[in-house]
Every structure is written in structure tokens, then in C-alpha cells.
Amino acid sequence: MTLRRILFILCLVGPTASLAETVLPSLAVQNRKYTATNEFTVSAGVLPLDAFKKGFSLSGAYTLHFNDLWAWEVAQFFYSFPMETDLESELRAFDLKPTPFERVEQFVTSNVLFKPLYWKGAWLNSVLGYGELYLSAGGGYGWLTRTQRPAVSGGFGLRVYITELVSVRFDFRDIAFVSEIDTQNELWLGLGVSLAP
């Protein structure tokens, strides 16, 4: 009796499973809810690598989005405000002076953005959130305290959409200021708000 029931269930389930495989697609991907063409960004950031003077930066950028995967950050201008640490005063207590070296004052970059990951998530099972992960690579020019140098930049960022027009960005970028004598690397961490009209 049990064997008959098992065979009966298999006869019902078998054709239904094969029918579902032929009717339903094997891959289901939703289109992006938010797509931008023009984007204007204002960011606050920090240049944390200098042990004596950290840099607090303000920046503004314009980005042109070609499609869902590629964008061109046409220009991003940074201005850095120095914030002294206690290390220099601690060295003076021992009659020591740090070796003078250059500090970044301002720079401008242009980057290509590749946006391979777009996601949708639920916050506390009540609100849907959307975002993307992007990679950046490009170059620019920097004005340091004593020299001016070309720069090479690369990094990644994370965007969370607030509305169709407004999003919040976190950027992590390594910027190398190159000269004939040496290369000065800086790390820039930035938090910004973008408007995509």
C-alpha cells in the first residue's frame, strides 16, 4: 500500500517538475531601479597617512554615467585642510625635530568607474534598500607644499540610494603623486552625498 502511494506521488510530481523547468527561466535578474546620467557629488574626507598632520578634505565632483556598468568621473577637485597631531609637540619635548616632508594641499582627478555589483536588500524586513559597488581608476594632478606632481589613483566605493535623485557614497582611494625623485602615496577616505537630476 505504501509503495503504491509513493509511485502515485512520483507520477504527479515528475511531470510538474519538468514542466516548471521548461516554463520558468533559470536566471532571474531585475533591472536597476535607479539609473543616472549626470551626477554631482559633495564629499568630506580625510587623508590619514601623515603622522604629524592629518588632512581633512572637502571635494566636489561631476560624473557622467554612460550605462549601468560604466561611468566617467570627469573631474573631482579636493582641498585639504591640515590638522596637527600631538606627535610633533611630543618630539619637541625630547629636543627632536621631524624631517620635513611635503603635505598635500589640493589635487584634481579624473577616473573611470566600473560598477559590477548592484544590490537590493531589506532593512528589518520592512524597508527595501538599493546600492552598488564600483571600482575607480584614473589620474590627475596635485599641488603639494613644495612641488606640483601628476597623480595616479585607484580604489573602490559603495553607494546607497536614498531616493531616485539622492544617494550616499563612501570612497576608498589610493593616490600616488609621482615625481622624478620619489612617489608620495596618500590614502583618501571620503563620505559624500550625490544628486542625480
Image (cartoon, rainbow, N blue to C red):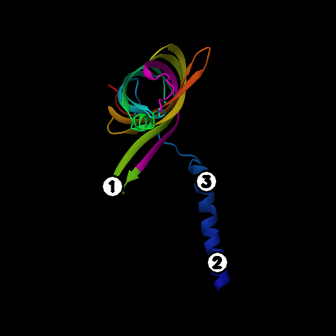
Q: Which residue is mark 2?
A: 6
Residue 47 makes an appearance in the image = yes
Q: Earlier in the sequence, mark 2 or mark 3?
A: 2
In this view, the residue in front, 85 or 148, is: 85
Q: Identity of the amino acid at label 3?
A: Glu
Which quadrant is home to the N terminus? bottom right
Disc 3, SS:
helix
Q: Residue at x 49, y 19 (%)?
A: 110
What stretch of residues is rendered in magenta?
Answer: 96-121
Q: Classify residue 53 by image quadrant.
A: top left
Q: Main secondary structure of the magenta part?
A: strand
Q: Which residue is mark 3?
A: 21
In this view, the residue in front, 19 or 168, is: 168
Q: Which residue is mark 1?
A: 126
Q: CA distance from mark 1 to mark 2?
A: 41 Å
Q: CA distance from mark 2 to mark 3?
A: 22 Å
Report whether 138 appears left or right of 170.
right
Disc 1, SS:
loop
Q: Earlier in the sequence, mark 3 or mark 1?
A: 3
Q: Identity of the amino acid at label 1?
A: Ser
Where residue 197 appears, as percent x and y from the top left, is: 32, 25
Where residue 113 appears, as percent x and y from the top left, is: 51, 27
Neighbour class for label 2 at 10 Å: few (<14), some, many (≥20)?
few
Residue 136 makes an appearance in the image = no
Where residue 10 appears, as percent x and y from the top left, is: 64, 71
